[in-house]
Image: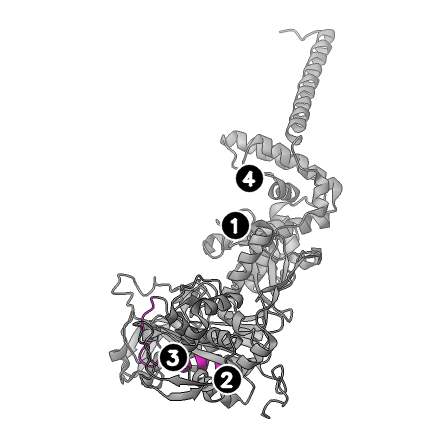
């Protein structure tokens, strides 16, 4: 075929160029149109200048120490220098090699990915730069659609125009999700390696750099083999980019993952923290509380809280030992579980010396019991008990006491035996305890314990449980009587009496005859209290209790004078603080102030203050209340040689044991009982069960306050 004439060839070439230009123009116009359409509802990039990622709201005690936190995303924001240079290099090598030079999108990478998608008939390969990933995480969904990709590219270009590369990497490094609830490299570094992101080694940095592609798929916890492969790929890419030498890469690829997981530590004041969260959620809303990185200054004293935790745990252990070994143990093997698969709720956090925790028996011999306090693969979970550790039970041989699969309750020791931790056997029969302490003058709640074990029950027995208060109700009766003109020195007869068919009796089932009102109160005699209530009228007593802050609806029956009503521990503590406050009630509160991430105070609490009784009435009642701790039912408190007042309380059949007492500066209340209201046992009174817990706590609460005294005291406190 003869060649085309030169003129015709030029004409065809011109038409081809024109067609190509028309196609290009159409494509450009279409892309511009799509970009315009899809960018209409996009956020303004200027918003990013004021962007704050969801961060942790921290709670601080009264001395500025962190006691807990709230968060939806576990994130610690750091600056550019907070990321180790090797981490930045690893991320760029695996995620975006041209990060330093591109303008938001990588045209060649996009084209290559598109060609791959066409050939594979799918969307198997991504082409997002770090900037595009940042735009998606901040503003867009994860839907893999054309619209989203165009919006992503548009936003990436805008971000590149508005921010430097350092700023973009910093935003990315703090925003990206890296698995196990960790957001940003700092939080992930602290979780996976127990160190800051600025201190990461090569292999550690490579592992984290590989996670953004698939935080679950490449999780070193869930999929360690895939995580190792991904980490080694990052190392190879760094080698190819000249970031590390060949021998350095080979050495690093041969190393294990090297995880050093930060073990979760139990909150020191979990019930207190829950109360704070509920109050904040009501005031600010859950989103702001859990996402805005607030600073919450609370009233808690961390040292006193730790003392309260130990006091309640030790007190319950002492009660259980006094009660005697029952041997009623759960056995996981009998329940169809295996030893390896069993997990106790206590094991969600790491326990240490001094802690009380449930353990699983794995081996029982006559002179040795082996158990564990965590999963078998957790270092330090193995413990051993020797005969001295269970001697109190009265059972001589370990294999007669327990068997493999039994769940036991132990007190961890700091000593070791054959490479395992030592522990003493305790008992958990279900008895619960609660403690609440507050500063008399300010209403600050200093410590709060809502039960024996938060892992087993989050129910707060200090604020939510309404229990019969027994004789701890009597101060309301005597206060009403004093307002009616009764004096502590008045004589009252403790003898048989009949109130219209109601024939009461005392705990000891005896009568003491004529005695002063002060002695009747100190010895917690029932007949005198009922006579005084009958004299002033039970309705007046109930009205007075309501003035003290008791909110429960109390029926107007005379037995109420002996504590047949149900009141919370929190209300009892707040009410008793009225007496050392010269008749003034200061409402208990948990939060001092709330500030935002910029330090601006959003809210500051001012507790409600109200005069409940007159000063003279309060000081007269102090004479009675101090008599209880000097020579009455709580005389054991006198051993501390400090000014105290208070009242014991024990209910019928010994179902509830109370002691509410105070020093000039602190009021503390303790309750012990069973949730199902079973008896604590014969003679398990408030003085026997609750008072020792109170005493243990108050020793710490009065430390350094040797010279304090109650209002109206003319003489200093007894020298110590």
Q: Is residue 471 visible?
A: yes
C-alpha separation, residue under disc 2 versus residue under disc 4: 76 Å
Disc sitting over residue 526 in the figure: 3
Estimate the x, y position of residue 667 in percent, counting from the top left: 54, 76
Mark 1 neighbour density, 10 Å: few (under 14) some (14–19) many (20 or more): many
Of pointers 3 and 1, the one earlier in the residue sequence? 1
Q: Nearer the viewer, mark 1 or mark 4?
A: 4
- Which one is earlier in the sequence, the residue at label 1 or at label 2? 1
* Mark 4 touches mark 3? (CB < 8 Å): no
| Measured Cα–Cα span from mark 3 to mark 1 | 67 Å
Q: Which mark is residue 142?
A: 4
Which of these two is toward me, 623 or 640?
Answer: 623
Which region shows up in magenta? 676-695
Labels 1 and 4 touching (C-beta < 8 A): no
Assign a secondary structure to mark 2.
loop
Which residue in the structure is indicated by mark 1? Answer: 215
Q: Earlier in the sequence, mark 4 or mark 3?
A: 4
Expressed as whole percent of the image width and height from the top left, the position of residue 711 reads 62, 81
Q: Residues within 10 Å of mark 3 (few under 14, many from 20)?
A: many
**As displayed, is residue 419 above or below residue 57?**
below
Task: Return the residue nearer the eye: 464 or 230.
Answer: 464
Looking at the rendered structure, the secondary structure element under dot 3 is: helix
- Residue 680 lies within the magenta run: yes
Question: Which element carries disc 1, helix, strand or loop?
Answer: loop
- Badge 4 crowding class, 10 Å Cα cut-off, few under 14, some 14 to 19, many 20 or more, is few
Q: Position of residue 160 (x, y in %)?
A: 72, 41
In terms of sequence position, does the residue under pointer 3 or pointer 2 come before the other? 2
Separation of residues labelled 4 and 3 (CA atoms): 71 Å
Residue 361 image-quadrant placement: bottom left
- Tell me the residue that label 2 is attached to: 488
């Amino acid at each position: 075929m003869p060649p085309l004439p030169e003129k015709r060839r030029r004409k065809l070439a011109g038409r081809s160029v024109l067609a190509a230009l028309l196609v290009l123009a159409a494509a450009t116009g279409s892309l511009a149109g799509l970009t315009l359409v899809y960018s209409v509802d996009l956020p303004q990039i200027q918003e990013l200048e004021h962007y704050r990622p969801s961060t942790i709201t921290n709670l601080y005690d009264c001395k500025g120490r962190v006691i807990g936190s709230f968060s939806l995303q576990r994130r610690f924001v750091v600056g550019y220098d907070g990321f180790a240079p090797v981490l930045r290099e690893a991320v760029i090598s695996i995620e975006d090699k041209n990060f330093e030079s591109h303008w938001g999108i990588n045209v060649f990478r996009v084209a290559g990915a598109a060609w791959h998608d066409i050939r594979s008939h799918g969307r198997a390969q991504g082409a997002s730069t770090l900037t595009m990933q940042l735009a998606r995480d901040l503003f867009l969904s994860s839907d893999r659609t054309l619209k989203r990709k165009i919006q992503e590219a548009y936003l990436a270009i805008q971000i590149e125009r508005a921010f430097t590369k350092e700023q973009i990497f910093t935003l990315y490094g703090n925003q990206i999700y890296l698995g196990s609830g960790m957001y940003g490299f700092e939080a992930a570094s602290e979780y996976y390696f127990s160190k800051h992101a600025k201190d990461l080694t090569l292999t550690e940095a490579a592992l984290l750099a590989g996670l953004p592609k698939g935080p679950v798929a490449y999780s070193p916890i869930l999929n360690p083999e895939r995580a190792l492969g991904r980490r080694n790929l990052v190392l190879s890419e760094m080698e190819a980019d000249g970031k590390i030498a060949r021998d350095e890469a080979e050495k690093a690829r041969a190393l294990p993952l090297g995880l050093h997981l930060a073990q979760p530590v139990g909150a020191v004041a979990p019930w207190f923290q829950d109360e704070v969260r509920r109050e904040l959620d009501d005031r600010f809303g859950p989103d702001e509380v859990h996402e805005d990185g607030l600073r919450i200054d609370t009233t808690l004293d961390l040292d006193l809280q730790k003392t309260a935790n130990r006091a309640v745990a030790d007190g319950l252990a002492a009660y259980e030992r006094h009660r005697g070994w029952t041997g009623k143990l759960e056995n996981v093997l009998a329940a169809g579980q295996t030893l390896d698969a069993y997990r106790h709720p206590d094991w969600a956090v790491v326990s240490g010396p001094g802690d009380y925790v449930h353990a699983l028996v794995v081996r029982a011999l006559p002179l040795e019991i082996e158990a564990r306090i965590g999963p078998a693969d957790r270092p330090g979970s193995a413990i051993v008990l020797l005969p001295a550790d269970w001697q109190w039970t009265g059972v001589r041989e370990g294999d007669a006491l327990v068997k493999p699969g039994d769940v036991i309750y132990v007190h961890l020791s700091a000593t070791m035996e054959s490479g395992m931790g030592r522990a003493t056997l305790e008992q958990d029969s279900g008895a619960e305890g609660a403690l609440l302490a507050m500063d008399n003058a300010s209403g600050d709640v200093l410590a709060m314990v809502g039960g024996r074990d938060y892992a087993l029950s989050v129910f707060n027995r200090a604020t939510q449980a309404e229990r019969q208060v027994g004789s701890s109700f009597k101060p309301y009766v005597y206060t009403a009587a004093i307002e009616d003109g009764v004096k502590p020195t008045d004589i009252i007869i403790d003898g048989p009496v009949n109130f219209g068919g109601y024939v009461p009796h005392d705990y000891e089932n005896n009568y003491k005859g004529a005695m002063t009102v002060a002695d009747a109160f100190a010895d917690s005699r029932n007949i005198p209290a009922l006579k005084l209530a009958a004299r002033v009228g039970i309705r007046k007593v109930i009205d007075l209790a309501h003035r003290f802050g008791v909110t429960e609806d109390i029926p107007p029956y005379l037995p109420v004078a002996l504590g047949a009503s149900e009141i919370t521990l929190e209300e009892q503590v707040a009410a008793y603080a009225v007496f050392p406050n010269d008749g003034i009630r200061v409402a208990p509160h948990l939060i001092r102030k709330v500030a935002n991430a910029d330090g601006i105070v959003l809210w500051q609490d001012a507790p409600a203050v109200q005069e409940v009784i007159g000063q003279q009435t309060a000081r007269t009642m102090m004479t009675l209340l101090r008599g209880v701790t000097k020579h009455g039912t709580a005389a054991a408190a006198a051993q501390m040689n400090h000014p105290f007042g208070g009242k014991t309380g024990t209910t019928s059949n010994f179902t509830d044991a109370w002691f509410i007492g105070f020093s000039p500066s602190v009021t503390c209340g303790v309750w012990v009982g069973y949730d199902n209201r079973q008896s604590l046992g014969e003679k398990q009174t408030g003085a026997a069960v609750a008072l020792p817990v109170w005493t243990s706590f108050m020793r710490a609460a009065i430390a350094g306050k040797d010279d304090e005294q109650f209002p109206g005291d003319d003489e200093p406190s007894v020298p110590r």
